[in-house]
């Protein structure tokens, strides 16, 4: 049975969330700190992690939180974990982290506990547990996390990717499908023309705000290219709604959708990353 999240939070809660964002934002590292981040070929990058929360269609509470670590550039799965969660905090644009990050933090903590070879024994997953060693010195630690959501391209410059990066002390890159229109960025005719000119993998252009800050990059990265990179076959065309594939851990029968929250809240930006961020174009349908 579909569930609904709590209603709009009181002003006291929103004020608390704003203060917490401001406090954590002071700890954002927005420069390259590792050698592989400064290399255009990413030489030295060996392990890439990704996190996402996908919602059950028609249900604003039940969701599947997932973490995957891949080798790079082979893109072989080193570790994967997913779990059903209940997101009872309401969705509020600009405060996605308070709805999703607690579950993503748990997945990273579980990675450390289940696969100690992937994370250092003394690595803190939660804020306040002490300093973490550099990921570059660890034999199997993910060196960067790709996060479905905003980073520095955000209403207050501190989206879910920055939030997760600060709390895990891991470099995080926000990856988004839609443009968040802040700091003068607009999905206008000029922007759409730049998108149209993106033709092949690697084509990109900077998302430059009125403040003069590069808040991310718009690039092309289609699902078809990802399938080819991973050596995966094209998914079969469903002949009826009941034949659509599902991906539910532990026997849950819900059907998942990536559209459980408004798309305009997605935009990129890192804590520490090889570039300021990445704005994803799904084929040529990107807005």
Image (tube, helix red, strand yellow):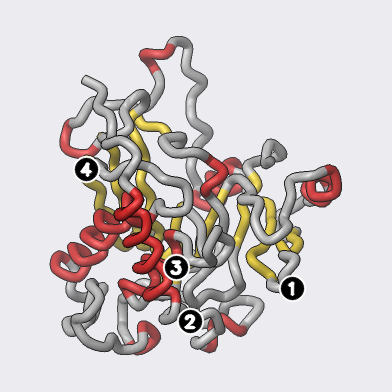
Task: Report helix, strand or loop for mark 2.
Answer: loop
Distance in Å between CA atoms under marks 4 and 2: 30 Å
Residue at point 22%, 72% (across, down)? 126
Label 3: few (<14), some (14–19) or many (≥20) C-alpha neighbours in 10 Å: many
Distance in Å between CA atoms under marks 1 and 2: 18 Å
Residue at point 31%, 82% (across, down)? 139
Between disc 1 and disc 2, whose residue precedes? 2
Distance in Å between CA atoms under marks 1 and 4: 40 Å
Between disc 3 and disc 1, whose residue precedes? 3
Q: Nearer the viewer, mark 1 or mark 2?
A: 1
Residue at numbered disc 4: 85
Horizontal and vertical percent position of residue 108 = 26, 64
Q: Nearer the viewer, mark 1 or mark 4?
A: 1
Residue at numbered disc 3: 162
Quadrant containing the C terminus is top right
Horizontal and vertical percent position of residue 282 = 62, 42
Label 4: few (<14), some (14–19) or many (≥20) C-alpha neighbours in 10 Å: some
In the picture, measured across the screen, residue 205 lies left or right of residue 84, that is right
- Let me know if residue 75 appears in the view: no
Residue at numbered disc 1: 212
- Let me know if residue 276 appears in the view: yes
Asked if the residues shown at circle 3 and circle 2 are in contact, with their CB atoms under 8 angstroms apart, the answer is no
Residue at numbered disc 2: 29
Choose top left, top right, bottom left or bottom right for residue 152. bottom right
Name of the residue lying farthest toward the left: 113
- 82 and 124: which is toward the camera: 124
């Amino acid at each position: 049975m579909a569930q609904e999240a709590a209603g709009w939070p009181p002003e006291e809660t929103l004020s608390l969330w704003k203060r917490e964002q401001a406090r954590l934002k002071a700890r954002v590292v927005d420069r390259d700190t590792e050698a592989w981040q400064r290399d255009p070929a990413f030489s030295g990058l060996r392990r890439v992690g990704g996190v996402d929360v996908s919602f059950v269609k028609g249900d604003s509470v039940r969701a599947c939180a997932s973490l995957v670590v891949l080798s790079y550039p082979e893109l072989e799965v080193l570790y994967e974990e997913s779990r059903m969660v209940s997101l009872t905090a309401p969705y509020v644009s600009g405060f996605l982290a308070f709805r999703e990050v607690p579950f993503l933090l748990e997945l990273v903590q579980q990675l450390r506990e289940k696969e100690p070879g992937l994370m250092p024994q003394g690595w803190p997953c939660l804020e306040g547990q002490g300093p973490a060693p550099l990921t570059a010195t660890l034999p199997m630690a993910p060196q960067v996390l790709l996060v479905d959501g905003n980073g520095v391209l955000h209403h207050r410059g501190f989206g879910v990717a920055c939030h997760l990066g600060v709390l895990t002390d891991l470099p995080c890159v926000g990856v988004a499908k839609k443009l968040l229109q802040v700091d003068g960025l607009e999905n206008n005719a000029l922007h759409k023309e730049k998108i149209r000119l993106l033709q092949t993998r690697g084509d990109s252009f900077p998302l430059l705000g009125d403040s003069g800050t590069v808040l991310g990059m718009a690039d092309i990265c289609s699902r078809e290219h990802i399938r080819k990179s991973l050596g995966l076959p094209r998914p079969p065309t469903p002949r009826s709604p009941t034949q659509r594939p599902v991906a539910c851990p532990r026997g849950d029968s819900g059907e998942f959708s990536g559209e459980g929250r408004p798309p305009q809240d997605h935009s990129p930006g890192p804590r520490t990353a090889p570039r300021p961020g990445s704005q994803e174009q799904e084929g040529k349908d990107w807005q």
